[in-house]
Image: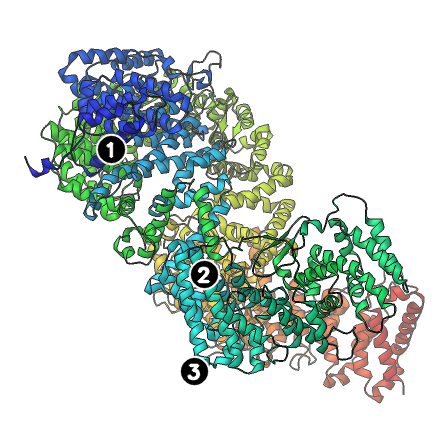
Amino acid sequence: MSTSSKLTLSLGEQQLAKLTSEAPEIRMRALEQVETRFIRCLQLGEPINFKPVLLLKQLIRWFGYSPPAAADRVLALMLELLRSNYVDAIVHKIPGQRLLTELDKIRKILGSLQSKRAMELLDDLQSLIAVVYNETTSVDRDHSSGESQSSNSEIGDFSIERFKLGPADYEPAWTRASLDDMATMKTFVDSLTIDIDLELLDHLTNLQIKLCDYPAEYLLQTPHIFLRLLHIQRMHADKVLLQINRTLFTTVKLLQRRLSIRSKTLYYSASIESLETSPQQLRVSSALTLLLNGCLELLGPPQLEVCRHNWHIIELIVEVIETFCQISAPVPNRIVERLGLIVPNLLDYCGRFNAGPDNELTNLTRNLMIPRLQSLIFNGILMDVTSLNLKTNPKMDKVAARALLQPIMTDSVYLECVPLRKQELCDLCDSLKSGTQAEKQQMVRLKQAYSTALNQLVSKTRLAPRELLREQRQVCLVLIQLGSEKLLKQLCQAMVKCSCFYGTQPELRQEAESLLSTLFDLPDERLRGSALRLLKQPVVDHFHAFLNNTSYLTGYSNIELARQHILGLPMSTRLLRKLLVHAWMPHQPQQAQAQLQQWCIDYLIMLLGLAKLVDTKDFYKIFKIVLPVMPLVICRAINYPQLQQLLFELLNPDSDYLDPPQAMRGNVCYLYHPDGKLRTEAQTRVAYALMLQDPQKKYRPIPDQLCLALMGPDLCLVRPPLNYSKLFSERLNLPFTRSLQALLRLLETPDMKPGIRKSTLIQLNVLLHNWQAVEAFTNCDGSYMLCLNALHNPLLREKKDSSMDADAMPPAISILLRVLFRSEHFRQEFKDNGEILCCLLRCLYMHPLEAQVRTEVSVCIFQLLFHEHMTPTEERLVMDVDLSPLMVPVSYEKDHSSPPTAASEGIALQDHLLAKHFGGKEALAAQHWRLFTAQRVCGSPEDMKLSPLHGLDIINTLKLRPADLALVQASLVDVQLQNQLVETGNCSNHEMLQKYVASLHLFVGFLHNKVPAAACTNLWKLMHKYLKVSPGNEADRELYMALLDLCLSCLRHGLPRVPMGLCTALSTDPHHSFFVILRDTKISLSLLHLVTDCLVELLSEEHYQGHFPWYGKLFMELSALARTHFEERNLQHVRCLLRVLSKLGECPLELDDNKLQMYYQHFVQLSSNLRTSTQTGAQWQRDCLLVICQLHEQSESSLPIGGKSGCGTKVLRYLLGLCGHGDGEVRALAWVSLANWIRSSGDSMASILLEFVDALPGGLAACCLSTMLDGHEQMLVRELAARVFELLMPHIGATACCELLKCHSFLQEAHTALATLELYPILRQEKEPSGTKNSCEIIACYVSICVNLVLLQPTWCATLCEHAFTNALSDVLKLRTPEKPHHSAYLELCAGQICKLYALCYQLNFEFLQRSICRDTALLKSFFALIGDVLWQHGMPEHQLVQVLKLLMVFCKDKNAYEFLCDQFREHPELFANLMLFGLNPAYVQEELQRYTLATLSLVLIKAQAGKEEHNLLKVLESYVDETHIIVDGKDAKADSDTDNEDKENNTNALNKQFKMSLSLKGLPKPNNKAIAKYLKGKKTHVEFTNGVVFLYHALDQLFELHYPTKAFSFLQPASKSHSQICEVLGNLLKESAVAVDTARNYGLLEHVIQLLETFLDDGSVGNATVYVRRVGAHKSRDIINNLIVLLNMMVHWHNSPHAVITDTVMASRVVRMLLRLWPWLSHSAILKNMTVCLTTFLTEHSFEMCKQTSLVLSSQSHSLLQLMVRVADHETTKKELPGAKNAYLNCNSQAVVEAALRVMINCCSCAEGRLSLGKMRVLDMFDTILPGNSSGVSKVKQDVVLSWLTFWGIFSRYELGYKMCHMPALLNTVRRSPPLSKIRMCCLRILRNMCFCNSNRLQLVGMGPFMNLLGDIVSQPVRCVGGADDTGLESFEEHNLVVLCLWKLFGFSAKYRALLRGSKLFKQLSILFDQLAILESQQPQHFKTFPFASDLNNMLWYLFEALNP
């Protein structure tokens, strides 16, 4: 026999027989032995010699004894026996039915015990028996036909009643299956009753493939395929069970997809059947519940090392729960409770493992790995289910839910190793509001304390002494739990080392005192003894320093520390009191009590010993902490002679150590001493002290020494002690208030007779025997003084009637006694009043023989001495101190409770958490704290080891155990996955490999897509190792399929390395097993199905995108294989291949159009080969049609699939046939294919439609329209039909469309559809929608058809506007926008279609819009909100914003709508800014969005010029100030934006990054993209954005630079509309905004423009204008002129503003030089000439520098710009007008040019250079031509031109060169000929006025008769306001005022001329005028003030007459 055999354990028959012994003790002992040996051998993997069948029978017989003992342990042992490898012997010997029968008997026996644990174990046993016996049956089926027949009978016994379904479990069927489909499904059901496993596997595979044909609800209807699958799931195991679960998994996936489809409005259709006639189907929630329940029943027991079962069941459970989430339905409570039982069972199973030696840790971890992984998975499942129920079930029992989560909450390893779940659990518990907040805070507090304490035990994290002392409270919370003497020593050392800081840091001293208090009262005797030893040493050292005269602390003197009450330790009165009280508490252990007492006595001895070592004053300061506790010190010194001797000497009245009152108080305490000698000495000392305190002899004398001796030592001795319970003997609740108040009023009476006072006090004393009466007395005013006076007055020496007062003293003392007991306030007042104590002592000495007085006085003194320690009540006196050594004068009870310390609080916290959080499970709580300790010491769970904790000074219960570490390591799923992958890679056994692969399923199912990268790579390598080669035998095939399952699971969970590796393998290995299997026409269907599933998941991978060449090759190869399989009638193989082909069609195939055409025809043929219109074969048609659509999308040009006849027409007919298929998805795909066919047909569509007029009623268009209007059709199909109809509209023509819409009552249907609009796509699943519903997409189709018809026939718009449908659309706009993600369809309807329709109505039906939407403020508000919704939606479609801008421009055309929108934009300026800025992004150059944005902006700026300030949208932009001033450079603009990651990848988003907008930009064509990128890269300008105008200008400037690059722009290229729009908008913006002008100056815009023009003028290829035009022709110069006009137009608008002033000389010179060089081009364009002159006008209008440069002749120039302007004015004035209407514009333009040129001349008059130049050119000679010299002459020049010239002369005449007399006859003649107050006449008069101001002209003018006559005539002109004037009079005194001013200047400054005027007729006329004005002023003062120039003329006449007077 080998050594191993000798060591094998055994369970003999005799030992097993003891399990049924009659003696209970023998049975229990035998059970313990059997259980211990058996479980240990299982855990260690050791063999054991026993008979399994006998053991099982004995365990069953155990329950035959009553009462059944240890039922849980016996059942658990049976469970382990059946889980072990010994189960095979049991299965072969004992039938399963018999075992179940025995278990039922046991259940009945245990039913009366109501043991929940036993019932759970019985359930587990029954489930396990079913699994074990099913597995064995499946294994033996091949060898036993009899068992197959038995199984067959069980399978055939299917009954719906077994599922216990009720009416609530059914609902009306969503759809009804056709008869053909019903027959097909019945064949499926029949195929599931087969009794041969191999055939059943094939049938299940076929069913799994064909299930995709049918809507998921068919499986829930008759013939109940779903229930059949659940039925056979219970009856099978191994491969069959796996395939059944695969089929159920597919069913659940189909159900999820169907639910997702049905949740969208587009997939709803009105049901034709009523609820009464429609069939019933199983409710989804009920079906899921049945499936979940079945999975939980099949859930096998956890395995030790590898997992053979469970992974597919767990995967199915997870998928079912996700489906519950999808339908927002709660999981039934019974399922939740069952999950709630699985979680703790798994935790208990994992917790039962115990480790052997250290080398067994690896095996223990391996054994724990799979059970722990399942535990982690079910923890998460339970949390997910609880969270789901919390969201979906508001009435959920939250208390029960929290109880189910409690095991997870206590699973600390789970929470630490899965941190994401930890946060989820915390959030879930908070949502449950389970009241655990306090427990959570307590747990956090305790963990913080553990962390701080453990950090102190590790050298790297240790705190400095001062910091440690500050954290001592936290450390002390866990000091006892840790049991660390090292930590205790650190605390003591920290307290001593910080002694020097206590004087300056009071808070630090407070912490030290708190620490001392905790250490003195440590509950642990060992730690407290250590603490006392540690704390004694510093005290001794300090005292020895005093003795030896050495320094205790360097830098501090000993006495300085002592003054701070630091004698080694920082001591205080509070600490001394605690020591003196608690050291003598009897409840403490005797040894600990003796240690603490001795420490206290030693400290006091050393403290008192300082009296002889230090000065008296210093000692008194030191002794202050002892004085408040002096009575306690005397009490404790009774049994310690040394201390008593020191103390008694210290209290000598003749000594100087203490003040006499303090010494007397100490001696009073000795009056209660048990030693009579000391009492006698104390009496003498007290008497002596009282005599010393009365030097004035105020009180009655104290007895002398002889009398004292006669008194004896028992002055204060009361024996027996006064019975406290009799003090308040009156217990009746009699009224006492009135009596009490009456007695108090009587006692307050002055000069009361002593007898009355005595009797009153006696009555009061009797009344105060009641507890409540004493309380009322103490609350009365004056009671305090009453007690004092009653005690004090009888003691005075000079008091009259002292004998009578002395009689009143006993009741007064009795009153004081009770008052002190009742009122804490009185005790506090009297304790510091030394006079009260003296009075009581004098009473004691004066009445030594009166027993009552002596007793009561003694008790009163006792209360004053020990007031802080007593708690009096009505019936008893409680003292918190033991005063048994003293002769206490009153009876009392002791209270041994001690106040909590940090240490005791920590223990209480931990005990509370043990009871509440851990449910009283000490082992669980201990494990929690062990793991927490290990984590704090080691760090993360990955670094956790045993060794670091072994050397730590903590108790063993907190040190990590191997079982704990194994559980942690098993919970590190990432690490275990790596280990499992290594073991799997090293394994070569097929069976073990399958088990390992099954366990890997669990890992992937737990981690999902969070598998670490390294593990993911290794996982792929493992799969690739076996998947790259096709299987060669049956064992390889089983392993290969297992790995395919694993690969499929990895792909479903999105592991990134797997799809990448698989794609790479397929692209690099042409002989990959996947290709081999796909090419094998004889391959089994199950294997092909798994491979194609993997490929479908691979090609559907969303997280991985790549392009591989095998896509196209595989597509072509599979297409050929599909045809081959079809020909061989392998239809299921074809289905599998079609699924792959449909996914490959989405990939880039890189096929030319010919091949695409060929495959298009191929799949059309393949689709048509399966001629069925029912659901059977629907997936076939879906895949074929999907491939057809994908091929059409992949073609570079439209596939030539349409044609007039032949194949194309056949395809069209076939597609039309599929539009009537029974499956909605097939119909939808057919309509899409039909639309593609129509697009590809081109112009031949019209002729093709004629062929279908006879085939289809009304033709194809009518078919589309009728399908769209069919409410019983799915909405998606209706929408697609409508889109096809839109495609056909141009082909059938507008007239036919109108007729067709009229025939179908289209507008009425559309109006009706609006009433059933469903905004939210998600509809409730439990109810079918009532009636027809219409989605936003359907309404959008109605509107889109109207839009297209309006575009085809604009006049139809009037008909549309008259219909109610158009008005009802406004109500759609007013609806509230749905929330995300359901708002996109609504926005497309409103912004994309309705806005477009309204904008189309503007051209011919604007009045309708003004009457309707422009007056609807609610609609305008909704439109305003719509703008924001469109802007802020993710991935915004640009066409929506285009239509919004169009409608916005329409609203701007209406005054009311414009003003309303202005008000809205003023409140939200950021919205208008973002609306404008988005379209100005460089990404939209030359696109429709930018064109309409610029058009809108241009309109807004034009409206801003004439609008009110409050309705100026430019001001709105200026008010938009960004809160963050963003500095932007062109390379990278950083902003506070929430732009999505994909938006950031677009490098063209240069502008929008600056704004707070989440907007998606589309990609640009490559050339534009490169140009923009190059521009942005080179831009270096820095600008600070301060408001919206700056943002807007920056956007426009970017566009300007893109359109006009400085060096690359060519004027030879024609100017686009974008060029014109940008320049126009930029010019208008600069014209209206000063902010924009400043920004343009900073950006150097003018420099850019001038440089552009200079570059053009320097271009040698163009050269001189005249030469160029002659060379290339005038028509080819149009582009140059148009480009110049665009730029100059911008500058004209820009500089038509006072803000755009050019002040720089160099820039002004450059501008003038540019205009001079541009001058030759003006002769080729009148418009260009007009713009140039106008630009010059605006440039010189406000710029003095420009006037100077315009007047100068620049270098290299022969003329100045001013000279050219004079020539232009001269030429345009004198040229002949061209007759005819064609030249009307030129004539008008000529006048404008003259006015502009003259304006330049006027502007240049402001500078000397300009005036000099004008003088040299003799510009006034022009008036010879334009002004007639006599009255008969007629000017040939227009009056407007004449007026312009006269205006210029009026300005020029202000200066020296212009006011010389010339052309006087013409001027005077013009004045005479012009009517009064006319513009020309007034200009002439002003010129004459200016001439009068020249002194050199005075003589000539005075002597000129016509001139003087003219003046007189003007003065004599009648005016209406003056009396005598008729209606022909003038309405102003303006001319009079000018004439008087001329006369004042001519005649008012010389005596000669004054005389001439006085002697003339003119003087009289002036006098008359002056008098008339005076009369007017006096009679009509108000009219005088308002009449034009009346007041000015009056003043001027006054000045004139003043000058004329001598």
Amino acid type of the residue tagged 2 in the rendering? Ala
- Residue 72 falls left or right of residue 670: left
The mark that comes first in sequence, 1 or 2, is 1
**Which residue, given by chain and number where applicable, does mark 1 sit on?**
33
Give 1705 or 1280, whichever is nearer the viewer: 1280
**Which residue, given by chain and number where applicable, does mark 3 sit on?**
548
The numbered mark at residue 594 is 2
Residue 1897 appears at what percent x and percent y? 73, 83
Q: Which of label 3 and label 2 is nearer to you?
A: 2
The answer to whether any part of residue 1724 appears in the image is: no
The mark that comes first in sequence, 3 or 2, is 3
Mark 2 lies on a secondary structure that is helix
When the figure is inspected, residue 1231 is found, relative to residue 1842, above or below; the finding is above
Image quadrant of residue 333?
Answer: top left
- Residue 812 falls left or right of residue 105: right
Q: Which of label 1 and label 3 is nearer to you?
A: 3
The answer to whether any part of residue 1149 appears in the image is: yes
